[in-house]
Amino acid sequence: MDKYSCIIIEDEPLALEKTKDFVSKIPFLQLSACFDNALDGLAYLNSHKVDVLFLDINMDELSGIELLESTKISSQVIITTAYQEYALKGYELKITDYLLKPFTFNRFLQAVNKAMENLSQRSAEIPPEFIFVKTENRLEKIMLSEIVYIEGMRDYRRIHTENRRVMTLQNFSEFERLIPAGIICRVHKSYMVALHKIISIERNRIKIADQLIPISDTYKEQFFSSYKTEHKFLKFRRTMTAFCR
């Protein structure tokens, strides 16, 4: 059975233990980490792929709502709070569900099932074949299948494709929003690589085209998770192609 990663951001020890217990009862959820403050949780979200986020609202330094407002969260967000007055704001921020403490396991499971439905629908969507990037005074169309890697060069990013190079001021965060996960992955503060273009991986370096690109500790776990998923997909696609012949 495939498992979906989740994390909990909760500063109340008893509430944290209760949510951990509920997660442990659901076989398709894998608890990756727990945090008692939003700042540490945000740092983790910025460098790891997380399917489901269980998020408290009232916390010191940074509230759950402020966390959601401060960055783009791709995870399914399930709010866990004792304060119902934030419900409208939560839904404005496109959360998956809003659980009022104390909530039952049955209500918790309903929220998780809603998150699973959303994740299934997202994975079934047909990914785009191209993106447009700003370069000089025009928008240039780039086919995703032709991208080999993207290189950071101070204020610029250089997109290396199979037959050309394109310079743009768009940053890596914009590319991560534009390009679906599983196609191109961040591996270093200065590099993103196309997973299907990788020739080999050795000693935390990726050989792609005629380049050796480093894998930094910050992005190592995220990269190997994405690379493993991509390999599973390619294997499945080859099997289905052979079966249909």
Image: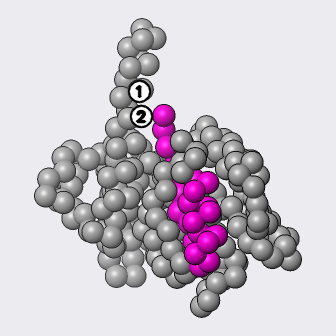
- Label of residue 185 in the image: none
Mark 2 Cα within 10 Å, few/some/many (few <14, many 20+)? few
**Mark 2 to mark 1: distance in Å?**
5 Å
**Which range of residues does the magenta coloring cover?**
1-23
Classify residue 77 as left or right of residue 202: right
Amino acid under label 1? Phe
- The reply to whether the C-beta atoms of the residues labelled 2 and 1 are less than 8 Å apart is yes
Q: Nearer the viewer, residue 126 or 222?
A: 222
Residue 231 in view in this figure: yes
> Is disc 1 surrounded by few (<14), some (14 to 19) or many (20+) residues within 10 Å?
few
- Whether residue 18 is in magenta: the answer is yes
User: What residue did someone put label 2 on?
Assistant: 233
Q: Residue at x 22, y 51 (%)?
A: 208
Q: Residue at x 49, y 51 (%)?
A: 30
**Residue 1 position within the rendered picture, expressed as x and y whole percent measured from the top left:** 48, 34
Tell me if I can see residue 66 in this picture.
Answer: no
Q: Is residue 83 above or below residue 165?
A: below
Give the numbered dot on residue 236.
Answer: 1
* Residue 31 shown left or right of residue 89 in the figure: left
